[in-house]
Image (cartoon, rainbow, N blue to C red):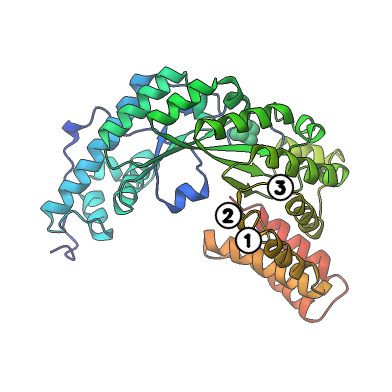
Amino acid sequence: MMNQPDTTYKIDTGKFKKPFFEMGPIRPPSEGADYSLLLRVVRNCPWNRCLFCSTYKTEKFGYRSVEEVKEDIDVAKALYDEIKSASWKLGLGGSVNNDLMRAIVHGNPEIYGDGEGLPIQNLVNVANWIVSGGRTVFLQDADALIMRTPELVEVLEYLKRTFPTVERITSYARAKTCNRKTLEELKDLHKAGLSRLHVGLESGNNDVLSFMQKGVTREEHIAGGRKVVESGISLSEYYMPGLGGKKWSKAHALDSASALSEINADFIRVRSLIVRKGTLLYDTFTGGGFEPLGEDEMVDEIALFVENLNCHSYIISDQMSNLLFEVEGQLPDDKEKILERISRYQQKSAMKKLEFRLKRRLQSYLGVYGYLDEELDAKITEAMEDIQSEAPDAAEKVNQAIAALKQGFV
Ligand code: SF4
């Protein structure tokens, strides 16, 4: 029955308080891999000044009321129920597949007609969430923790009441905000269901933090991080190799390692710096005020960083900005293994390094976009040919090709 192209399912919009729930632009890759339900509790970033970041640049921060967020949860629940009900009515026994999605989209052209925008994003998010068991939720946007504690507790409790299958609720948070909450508040949030916070340390060096206008000091990072760990909430800290540029590379690696060693987070996530067009850092760079590291210098910096970590965190490079996905393992046990993997790259010949870098970056790009446009294709082909013939300008061509690929990195 489901294979017939004319199978459709009409959503009962009477069950919806409004046509869609809000969703923000990003979530950590681990939440994407787990198909977490995305729920926006605040809009955009309350700080929005970091030089390297353009995610919310054109958007204003907005505090959302508990009532607004609860309405969004209700809409997600209504959609959840409708998808389930469609599955049963169309003979799929509660399971969700592409045929079911087509039946819902075709049955509701007034909602999903153009195949774009929030309604379709909601549908895909909730459907994937059902498929993955409805266990994980990610609260958006950049600093969900900034919500007043009793209000966030109310949202967490309502969310768990509405979806009893939920086992893990996570969000991004600024270290400043973690530090402003009392230990008791963090414990209350943990008790109400907040399982994990993702915090952008970026650097443990005060010169780098201040130059990048991070709005947080090393001391606040450490105090905020330690408080989260003590509260029982799982903590993911993000380290950004290259953020000190050539000027502060060594201090950035050493101070980030010592700060993260003091915090002893559950996870350290590596996010190598990409100087993106549209950021204030790009303007600073083109004006000569910032000298970025080359990719091999970045690898050396990561080696120095890992060497100086003294903690029990799990380190992971789960994002396409990183060249060496191999930088992953449980510290301190896997430290030597990770350093060996880095060293294997460092010991390659110059041409082999170029080939490795180009292929790795291409693999990451194709993983997201699936194809190259004509211009990119020509750049890659030219760089590859230069590597094969060991042409004197091979490094330049590879760097240009990789720079072009990286502008598409998410
Ligand atoms: S706090 Fe995070 S989201 Fe906000 S500007 Fe800085 S890096 Fe971007």
Q: Look at the numbered disc 1 and give the secondary structure of its residue.
A: loop
Judge whether residue 49 can be spotted in this image. Answer: no
134 is higher (above) or lower (below) than 90 = above
Residue 316 drawn at (x, y percent): 60, 54
Q: Earlier in the sequence, mark 2 or mark 1?
A: 2
Residue plotted at (70% across, 30% down): 214
Q: Nearer the viewer, mark 3 or mark 1?
A: 3
Which residue is labeled 3 in the image?
310
Mark linked to residue 318: 2
Circles 2, 1 touching at the beta carbon (< 8 Å): yes
Q: Which residue is tagged 1?
A: 325
Report the amino acid beneath label 1.
Phe
Q: Earlier in the sequence, mark 3 or mark 2?
A: 3
Residue 243 can be seen, yes or no: yes
Q: Tag 1 or tag 3, which sits nearer the N-term?
A: 3
Give me the residue at 12% from left, 64% from top: 1
Name the quadrant where ligand 1 sits: top right
Q: Position of residue 228 (x, y in %)?
A: 55, 31
